[in-house]
Image (spheres, grey):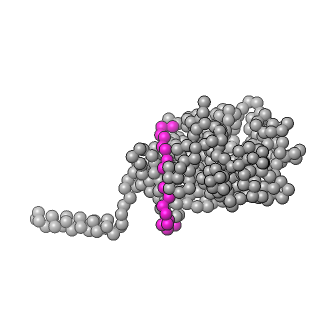
Amino acid sequence: MGSRWAGALLAVLALFTSMLVSAGPVQAAAPLPGGKANWVVSVGHMDLASKDNYRNWVRLGYYVFNTNGTVTTSYWNWNQRDQPRRVDAMTADCGGAVPTCTVRTVDGFADDPTGGFQGTFGYTTDGRLAVTWNQDTAGKPLTDPLTEYWNLETGLASGGVARITSPTFYGAYGNDVEVPAPGVFSTYTANFGVGYGSNASLDRASRATMSQLINDPRYNAQPYKGAFVVTKASSSDPDTRTGIVGREGAGGTWSFGAASNPWRLCNGSPCMGWLQPNSSCSGTDKDRVRYIGEVGGGRRNTEEYWCQSLAQGQPCYKHNSHPRPMLQVIDDSGKFQGWVGVEAFTHVSTSTGLPDSSWVAGYWGIFDTVSAALQPKLPN
């Protein structure tokens, strides 16, 4: 009896082994980065004009990590040499001092993601998160796998959020940002990035509304701040300026529900507007017009701002505004904690409204604007 049972057991084991072999290799399990599955990520290539001749690009999207060691991304991306256009997203009829104008975003952001990858992830011996993209969205192998090496921080927002950054994303404000050497952050051209992850869903139901940001006391008194790494002109002097990589502050000391001169909800559109007084705009009119709106599904928002002085007496400025696609950061409890975003600023002619290949006047960058609970590393 014992030998017959042993034979049957061996037969079952042999069948199970053959099934595993025929199924192909199994990806090793890996702990989720910071214990978080769903991420919003901004990544790009920004470099000196003297090195890449204004071939900057930015990408904004979602990373989804799985416990079997695989990861997928879907994203929107824009390249400076393509000169992407600003497109109408909604009308901001906010009343008060806020101009009633069309809010614009970057072409393509209101549509489905423009690209994606499949890949695997793991960890380096020094604790960095290594993400390798080796297939496109259809599962076709890439000719050359693309690997990113992220610094990982955990325990933010009482453990509800984790963060990934490129090596020199945070640092002092100024015009001499250290650009990581090839291979330090990625095996391809990406050299700057920032992202936040939690276990909240990435669908539209998780997104905070504009009404909540203005009226909910969890959000409306919070100043959201972060870093903005950007390629821009070194100065306003057309004879001497060149393309540089700088770092500025994102967000500010203001809040959405300030008692004096607060943001105002739009009528009929999911957006809000603010006439920011005494900003850094040049000229005698220092006010800056700002809008933020909900776009499409998922965690998408879009921001647009411009100096009122540039409108030259007209209610709206139709040319070289700052368009910023953004994705909301939501913690494990479902609470809004800010944004990651990109800027894809194409300079256009003020006479034709068409891109004029004025590369040095472009403004291409990535940023985060987040709550104090996410502890952005800002200069003192």
Q: Quadrant of residue 110?
A: bottom right
- Determine whether, in the image, residue 24 is placed left or right of residue 152: left
Q: Which secondary structure type mostly characterizes the magenta part of the structure?
A: strand
The answer to whether 300 is drawn above or below residue 24 in the figure is above
Q: Which residues are magenta?
A: 138-156
Residue 166 vertical position relative to residue 142 in the rendered view, above or below: above
User: Looking at the rendering, which quadrant does residue 208 occupy?
Assistant: top right
**Where is 184 relative to 280, above or below?**
below
Depth order, front residue of 239/380: 239
Residue occupying image coordinates x 80% and y 39%: 282
Can you say whether 330 is above or below 29 in the image? above
- Looking at the picture, how far across and down is residue 324, in whole percent? 68, 49
Residue closest to the eye, 134 or 294? 134
Quadrant that contains the C terminus: top right
The quadrant in which the N terminus is found is: bottom left
Decide if residue 281 is on the left or right side of residue 16: right
Residue 296, position in %: x, y?
A: 66, 55
Can the viewer see residue 216 in this picture? Answer: no
